Amino acid sequence: MKFVQIIDFETERLDEMEQLLEEAARHRGDKKGGPTRRMLLKDRDNAHRHYLLVEFDSYEEAMRNSDDPETTELAEQMGALASNRRFVNCDLLDARDLG
């Protein structure tokens, strides 16, 4: 079953956060077992609140990725750019394009 982690955070440094995420994706390349999809959302009612949705093929893949030292480093760098972080772990029950 696919797994999605939602990272709810606030930042006034979104450009730096986006750059950090892009660099991490480039560095990761075709490495197996990491995230398969990422979405970054901005709360329309709170300009500083954002949601990062990261999809994995499974919970087990997400946990292996979580144990990777590069992931730990990325999390620390993200933490330096954000406040009020909250992690929500979800099993993906359904996803489909409606249009």
Image (cartoon, rainbow, N blue to C red):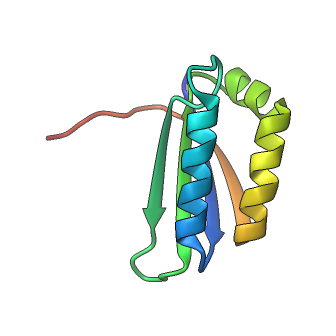
Q: Is residue 61 left or right of residue 21?
A: right
Residue in the foreground of this view, choosing between 88 and 19: 19
Please indicate, yes or no, whether residue 90 appears anywhere in the rendered image. Answer: no
Residue 71 point in image, percent of width and height: 76, 40
Q: Is residue 70 left or right of residue 23?
A: right
Residue that appears at 49% across and 42% down = 38
Please indicate, yes or no, whether residue 28 appears anywhere in the rendered image. Answer: yes
Residue 85 point in image, percent of width and height: 72, 66
Does 37 appear above or below 32? Answer: below
Q: Which quarter of the picture shows residue 32? A: top right
Question: Is the N terminus in the top left, top right, bottom left or bottom right quadrant?
Answer: top right
Residue 47 point in image, percent of width and height: 47, 82
Q: Is residue 56 left or right of residue 72?
A: left
Question: Is the C terminus in the top left, top right, bottom left or bottom right quadrant?
Answer: top left
Residue that appears at 63% across and 56% down = 7
Residue 50 point in image, percent of width and height: 53, 67
Residue that appears at 82% across and 47% down = 73
